[in-house]
Amino acid sequence: MKILCVGRNYVAHAKELGNEIPTEPVLFMKPGTSLFVEGSFQYPSFSEEIHYELELVLKICKTGKNILAASAHEFYNEIALGIDFTARDLQTELKKNGLPWEKAKSFDGSAFVSSFIPLESLHPSRNIHFELLKNGNLVQMGNSGDMLFSFDEIVSFASKYFTLEKGDLIFTGTPEGVGACYAHDVLCGKLENEKIFELIIE
């Protein structure tokens, strides 16, 4: 199982971090050891600035390579909310020096994923609304209709470079509003106004 992630897939988020608007999906990967689905987030000792990034996460349901965008919808049928935890202080230094992001993005426990639900149970237009609350305050709000690259475009593009296998996960990008979290913070994720998860930072 591999975890693919899309960066800068919402214009407002790219702008809030001072990044250029991409012309194709920006892909990076997280290892299996980054994934956790229950418990609490353990603040790593190597960072003093961990940021939350709420995202819609797709689960690949069958193997595919060089998938056409027109048929990409056949390769995923479940969705979840996920948090791409980012060591922003490390990432800033790495980017400044033109180095890869892995230390900042792919450390153990950096990929939280909620329970998956069938996509067919959501709005048929697939303009999916999602929110993150920190300590009861709304900090992120997004809609899949605002993504630069749609689910189908992401799946098709990724499959040019990586064989997508059943069980692979794709984090589809975060909207604006990312920010720092600290010990004792409580993060609550909502999908179409329904609470999907509650996560404690330790």
Image: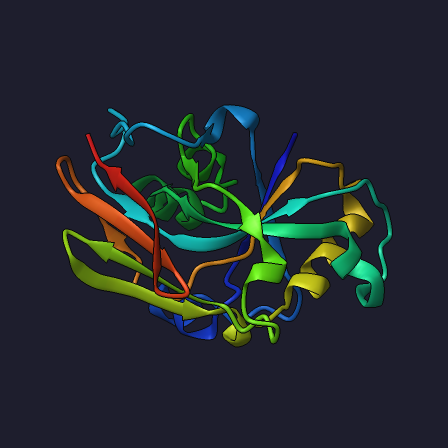
Q: Quadrant of residue 90?
A: top left
Colour pattern of the rendering: rainbow
Q: Residue at x 35, y 59 (%)?
A: 194
Can you give x and y, in whole percent of width and height, for residue 144 in the image?
Answer: 52, 69
Q: Nearer the viewer, residue 47 or 182?
A: 182
Query: Which quadrant would the N terminus be assigned to in this image?
Result: top right
Relative to residue 144, is residue 83 depicted above or below?
above
Q: Nearer the viewer, residue 18 or 147?
A: 147
Q: Residue at x 22, y 36 (%)?
A: 200
Task: Tell me: 177 left or right of 6.
Answer: left
Query: Which quadrant would the C terminus be assigned to in this image?
Result: top left
Instruction: Give the farthest residue toward the front.
Output: 121
Q: Residue at x 47, y 34 (%)?
A: 106
Relative to residue 154, is residue 10 depicted above or below?
below
Q: Nearer the viewer, residue 118 or 30?
A: 118
Q: Nearer the viewer, residue 16 or 68?
A: 68
Task: Tell me: 191 left or right of 161.
Answer: left
Q: Quadrant of residue 141?
A: bottom left
Q: Residue at x 41, y 68 (%)?
A: 142
Task: Tell me: 50 left or right of 19.
Answer: left
